Structures are given as C-alpha cells and as structure tokens.
Image (cartoon, grey):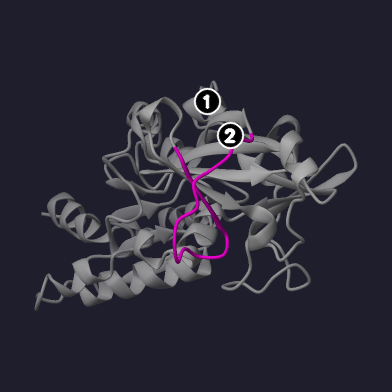
C-alpha cells in the first residue's frame, strides 16, 4: 500500500482507512498499514491473550493476528463471516501485526484539525481505545489507539521503563524541554522517565498546536531560551501533528536552532525520510525510551 501521503511536507494532513466492525465505523492511519489481505487461517498460540487469534506467515514473515472484535468486547465471528473478513497488516513500534476486521470502506484524506479528542462519553483518557473522532460523509469514524490495544495485550511492547532505571543516578538538569504527546498515559510516562533521568524543567502539551502556541508565546515574551531548548514530539496528534510542528519550527529563523526529536510509533524508514526532510534532528520509535534520554543528552551538550 502506498503511504507516500501529504505528511511528506508537514501539511497537517493524513489519510484514514475506514473499516467496519459489527456495522460500526472505525479508522486507522494509513501510514501504519503495510497491506490489506483476505482472511486466512491462523495457527493458535497456546496460553495466548484472548484477543490474539494466532500467528501466520505470509511471505516468510511471522505475523500476530489480533481480533479487534474481541478487543472491543463484540461477539466473535462465525465461520461464514470469517470467509468474507479481512486482515489489516500493520507495522508500528517495529512490530508486524494483523488486525482482523469485517470489511473496508475506503481511504479518506483529512486534516488533523478536523479530528477531535474523544470525550468521556466515548472513553476515559487512559482506559479508552480511541485517539480521535472524525466525521466523514455523515458518519462518525472512531480512530482507534492501536498502540494501546497492543500494549494492553502485551505490556512488553510499550515503553521500556526498565531502560531508565538502568541509567542509575544522574545529575539534575534544568534545561527546558517541551513535549507534545496526545496520549495522557504516554505523556505521563515520558515526563516521569525524563524526570527520573534528571531533567526537571519540562513543559508537556497534548498536541502540536498547544506546543506551537507555547513557542509563539515565548517568542512574544522574549523568554524562548528560558522555556524551550529542546522539543520532543509525537507524529499522530489532533489539531496539529508532529511533522507540521517540525516544519513550522525549522522554517522560523528564531526557532530553527532548537533541536527536535520525533518520538513516535510511526518511525520507520519511510517516516524517517519524511522527518529528515522536514528538519528533525533525531527520530526514535516509542519503545526506545532509554535511547531517547541518550539522544536528548547529546543534543543538549
């Protein structure tokens, strides 16, 4: 599947694949998708999580299949439904995973401005499985938090906090770091990890727009160096994504010197190429929290 989308130029747009589960509309960022294939039989894994259907090996690559209906507490497929269903094969956080879905509706190009954070009527901030909601052709499409779904099934795929503990005692540093991360849980984990690593002067925001507003306010106040000497940003965020934030910062004469670290589940070879073209100073996949600290250390020498 072609993922060479408009994120290339930091235009704050993405492509969403709309799919169905029990007649309900859901979405996934096309940048996460490797391919879509017809359902095929899988080999069950003994003592696996109930949402794991099993494993299969298309083209000599072992892939874990996850039943999204089970994750969302829907009824399971009958044999007739399985025949017409699909696997969305994804790659993020350096993992190859297939998500079992009923059918695919199509692909839509949308702006991050049009995606809103779900309220408590959809989910609670840390326990929900939605990162945003967008209305397309009269339908409300819930964009699922696939990273959280996978981490809930296997916590070892999440941030490796043990890497921070392995750093041992470190001197305290008050160098100001600005963080843009829309997941409340990951935002908290990143902040706690950096504090444990000795960085005490942190501003954390929920998306690129909030982070950019902080930068603009600091420019207006003449306090930029006091509050922003490094930026850590996710890519996927409502209102403004990390690529757009990177582009705006690096195109501004007053801020282009500020190092930017893209810390995202979407960091693969293709996304690294895009991030580099936009001026990112470093790009890391989200499990690498220990490496994030090392990169920040280097950039702030």
SS majority, magenta? loop
Q: Find the distance from the CA under tag 2 to the CA under tag 1.
A: 6 Å
* Res 3 label: 1
Residue at image x 27%, y 55%?
Answer: 288
Q: Decide: marks 2, 1 in contact (CB < 8 A)?
A: yes
Residue at image x 90%, y 42%?
Answer: 138
* Res 30 label: 2
Residues drawn in magenta: 39-56
Q: Position of residue 245 (x, y in %)?
A: 47, 43
Q: Tell me if residue 160 comes above or below residue 16 in the rendering.
A: below
Can residue 108 be seen by looking at this rendering? yes
Quarter of the image for the N terminus: give it. Answer: top right
Is residue 55 magenta-colored? yes
Q: Secondary structure at mark 2?
A: helix
Residue at image x 71%, y 63%?
Answer: 118
Depth check: 283 or 162 in front?
162
Depth check: 253 or 134 in front?
134
């Amino acid at each position: 599947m072609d993922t060479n989308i408009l994120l290339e130029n930091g235009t704050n747009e993405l492509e969403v694949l709309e799919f169905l589960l029990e007649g309900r509309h859901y979405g996934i960022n096309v940048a996460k998708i490797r391919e879509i294939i017809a359902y095929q039989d899988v080999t069950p894994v003994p003592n696996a999580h109930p949402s794991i259907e099993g494993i299969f090996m298309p083209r000599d690559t072992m892939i874990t299949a996850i039943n999204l209906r089970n994750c969302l507490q829907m009824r399971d497929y009958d044999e007739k439904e399985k025949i017409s269903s699909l696997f969305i094969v994804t790659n993020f956080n350096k993992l190859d995973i297939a998500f079992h879905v009923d059918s695919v509706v199509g692909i839509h190009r949308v702006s991050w401005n049009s995606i809103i954070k779900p309220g408590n009527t959809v989910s609670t901030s840390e326990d929900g499985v939605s990162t945003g909601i967008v209305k397309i052709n009269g339908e409300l499409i819930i964009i699922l938090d696939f990273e959280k779904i996978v981490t809930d099934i296997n916590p070892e795929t999440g941030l490796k906090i043990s890497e921070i503990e392995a750093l041992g005692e470190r001197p305290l540093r008050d160098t100001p770091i600005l963080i843009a991360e829309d997941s409340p849980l990951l935002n908290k984990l990143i902040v706690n990890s950096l504090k444990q690593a000795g960085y005490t002067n942190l501003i954390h925001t929920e998306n690129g727009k909030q982070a950019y507003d902080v930068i603009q306010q600091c420019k207006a106040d003449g306090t930029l160096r006091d509050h922003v000497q490094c930026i850590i940003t996710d890519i996927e965020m409502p209102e403004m994504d990390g690529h757009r934030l990177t582009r705006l910062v690096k195109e501004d004469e007053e801020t282009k010197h500020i190092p930017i670290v893209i810390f995202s589940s979407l960091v693969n070879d293709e996304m690294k190429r895009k991030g580099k073209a936009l001026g990112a100073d470093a790009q890391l996949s989200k499990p690498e929290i220990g490496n994030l600290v090392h990169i920040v250390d280097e950039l702030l020498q």
